[in-house]
Image (cartoon, grey):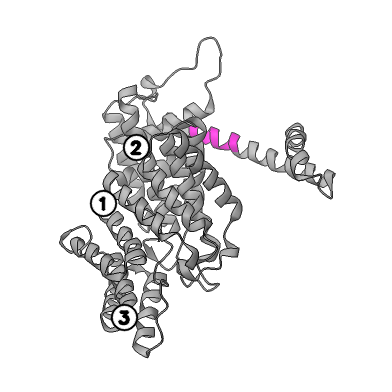
Amino acid sequence: MQEALLAASVQWPDEGVPDSPTGWLITVAARRLADRQRSDAARRRRETRAAALVPADEQVAPPADGTHVPEADDTLVLLLLCCHPALTPASQVALTLRAVGGLTTAQVARAFLVPEATMAQRISRAKQRIRAAGIPFRMPPPEERAERLSALLHVLYLIFNEGYTTSSGADLQRAELTTEAIRLTRAVHAMLPADGEVAGLLALLLLTDARRPARATPDGALIPLAEQDRARWDRSAIAEGVALITAALARAPVGPYQIQAAIAALHAEAPHADGTDWRQILALYELLARLAPNPMVTLNHAVAAAMVRGPQAGLDLLAALDADDRMAGHHRLSAVRAHLYEMAGDRAAARTAYLTAARRTTSLPERRYLEGRAARLASGDEPNRGSAVRSRPSRNAPPAM
């Protein structure tokens, strides 16, 4: 109740006294109590898991003077431990979700569509590797922190992406994964508030997740970004994300996550699809391509170029990806090429590319969407410019489309 009264003293002078002050205070106090109970339970789980990860003779004893080691520090140490470079990326993701995210082995296995026994072995091998390497449960030395933090942010990004658009299966998205990725990124941001890339990642996830309520029809069909009802976007998440990226860009060296968040902010702030500032988005992708080039960046760069300079400019950028083994058989390359062909008026080529993309994806909602685009072209319906640009964060790439 004290925390509720403090919140009232801060908010009411600016926002006004609510119609039911007593009800407001009781609701806020109940939420704070629930948050504290969840935090205490999560702390106990983390302590148990941290003890299981490290041999007893290497565990850090509590200070002799009885002082308390802050919970946030323990969380950061455990996150960095799960993202040790000795582990494979797949093991880093699995161990982070199990040891820090609080998901059971069965839940992690379901999230990545593998048998529970397979996931249990993956997590067990990760723990054994940590023990074999003799990695103590403590903050890594300064020279290792930058590398560990980079891996940690990448793991959180991958977890979010898998939840935002599942790589396979009948569901378009898994809210439990996106929610957990945002929660963990918030924890890292609370511990490292001055780090621009941590703030950039949190802003990126919030701005992207804000679109989730409008991304699918009631029956689960995918709705592309240009056709979404923007009134359904989460405006509070957008406001928080924009504030985070604005502050980060003003004070910290620019990094890839900040650029991606700035792109997401431009999409979020556009009142409608036709009001999107594609010229600024294109400039940001050109900067991102110089700073952190990868095939997925090129893919989204091609869409932005097409929206500003015409579809042929985008198709020219895509041509370079045909020789890239990482992208040559990826469904997103065919999907973007289909969209650009459709923009150019080449309906036959667009239909062929949509069908190719549909065959290559393992996500059923995406497959149905791509097959629907191909069927519409075959029926002679008029193309809808921009409708094939999907609101999806891609692995290792900005979620601008």
Q: Nearer the viewer, residue 316 or 97?
A: 316
Q: Which residue is mark 3?
A: 345
**Amino acid found under the numbered disc labelled 2:** Ser
Q: Which residue is mark 1?
A: 294
Residue 150: which numbered mark, if any?
2
* Quadrant of the image occupied by residue 218: bottom right
Element class at badge 3: loop
Count of numbered circles in the view: 3
| Dominant secondary-structure state across the stretch colored magenta | helix
Q: Nearer the viewer, residue 140 or 54?
A: 140
Element class at badge 2: helix
Please indicate whether residue 314 sits to the left or right of residue 78 in the image.
Answer: left
- Residue 224 in view here: yes
Based on the picture, tell me whether residue 44 belongs to the magenta stretch: yes
* Quadrant of the image occupied by residue 312: bottom left
Residues under labels 2 and 3: Cα distance? 42 Å
Residue 142: which numbered mark, if any?
none
| Residue 60, above or below 85 | above
**Amino acid found under the numbered disc labelled 3:** Gly
**Magenta residues, as a range?**
39-47
